[in-house]
Image: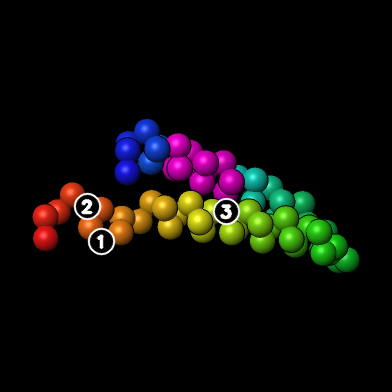
Amino acid sequence: MEASNAQWIQDRIQSLQIDLEERRKSLPRHTIRPHQLLAIEELEDQIRALEQQMVPRSGERGEKE
């Protein structure tokens, strides 16, 4: 993975985590609407997908087998 791509992914994860925290803080204590939970789940899914891109897969570490 290129360093610039890795940095972009890290920056994007950080941005999404900030958005996620803001959405969680804005949830009402009562009467949470389905679209609010769906938005949170979508952010969590995006973060998870980006984090998986950061994990090196076997054979991608530059090692010779």
- Is 15 included in the stretch rendered in magenta? yes
Please tell me how crowded label 2 is: few (under 14), some (14-19), or many (20+) other residues with Cα within 10 Å: few
Residue 8, horizontal then vertical, whole percent = 45, 37
| Residue bearing mark 3 | 46
Which residue in the structure is indicated by mark 1?
Answer: 58
Cα–Cα span, label 1 and label 2: 7 Å
- Please name the residue shown 25% across and 61% down the image: 58
Res 51 seen here: yes
Q: Residue at image x 57%, y 53%?
A: 46
Mark 2 or 3 closer to N-term? Answer: 3
**Which SS class for mark 3?**
helix
Compare residues 10 and 50 and report the one nearer the observer: 50
Do callouts 1 and 2 mark residues in contact (Cβ within 8 Å)? yes
- Say which amino acid is labelled 2: Arg
Label 1 vs label 3, nearer the camera? 1
Q: What's the CA distance linking mark 1 and mark 3?
A: 23 Å
Disc number for residue 61: 2
* Quadrant including the N terminus: top left
Q: Residues within 10 Å of mark 3 (few under 14, many from 20)?
A: some
